[in-house]
Image (cartoon, rainbow, N blue to C red):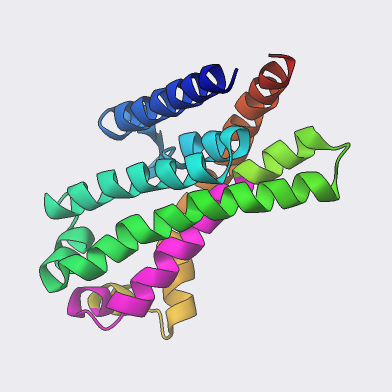
Amino acid sequence: MKNRTNVRWLTQLALLVAILLVMNYTPLGYLQVGPLSASLLSVPVAIGAMTMGPLAGTILGAAFGITSFLQAMEGKSLLSAAMFNASPVGTFVVCVVSRVLVGLCTALLFKALCKLLPKQEKICCFAGGLLTAVLNTVFFMGVLVLLFYDLPYVQELAQGMGATNVLMFVVMFVGVQAVIEWVICCLVSGAVTVPVRKYLKLN
């Protein structure tokens, strides 16, 4: 029984990692809303963290972060290229470590929420999805401004937006795009997690 459980766990984890990679390297991972592009990559992390626990959340967060770091190495955006040129190690912390924390914290907070609201599992699942997206924004931007706020390119962005302090820069930089990501992750992650958890309990 234990071996069967381990195989199922590894299979589910491999499937979610594969989905995350496919989403990252295809348009499936991004939703174009007018001029904005909202990332959906936090969705597999949320689902894994809520259905499989802290270890899976941590691994999926790491997978998410590594894809982001590889894109920074390739210079997919001006910001990531500037960060990587300034400090590859710092960029790794921003891209990978912050996402590892997202997966781990989501799983732990979801467990705590389920204990606090034992009869409201559906609400907990949607709240967990929202938490994942919010944590992703908070950790990523928090580490970015901590390590790279003095970077000339970041200062140029802040001045161009008229941001006079760190908090204003973060709010203006993430803007509407972050809110769209939060809503999508909340709805999609919750809608998928509820039946998956029910299935896992029955089996």
Nearer to me, 114 or 146: 114
90 relative position to 202: left or right: left
Q: Position of residue 4 (x, y in %)?
A: 53, 16
Residue 34 colored magenta? no
Q: Is the magenta stretch mostly helix, strand or loop?
A: helix
Instruction: Please give left or right for residue 100 compared with residue 3 in the image.
Output: left
Residue 195 vs residue 145, the one in the foreground: 195
Residue 179 visible somewhere in the drawing: no
Q: Residue shown at 60%/47% (left/top)?
A: 107
Q: Is residue 55 left or right of residue 123?
A: left
Q: In which quarter of the image is the C terminus?
A: top right
Q: Where in the figure is residue 72, as x and y percent of width and height?
A: 19, 54
Q: In which quarter of the image is residue 197?
A: top right
> From the viewer's perspective, is residue 135 above or below residue 165?
above
Instruction: Point out the residue furthest to the top here.
Output: 203
Magenta region: which residues? Answer: 130-155
At x 56% / y 21%, what residue is drawn?
Answer: 5
Q: Name above or below for residue 9 compared with residue 172.
A: above
Q: Where in the figure is residue 56, as x and y percent of width and height?
A: 49, 39
Q: Is residue 141 above or below residue 155?
A: above
Q: Quadrant of residue 1?
A: top right
Residue placed at 85% from the left, 45% from the top? 117
Residue at image position (65%, 44%) is 128
| x, y percent for residue 112 | 74, 52
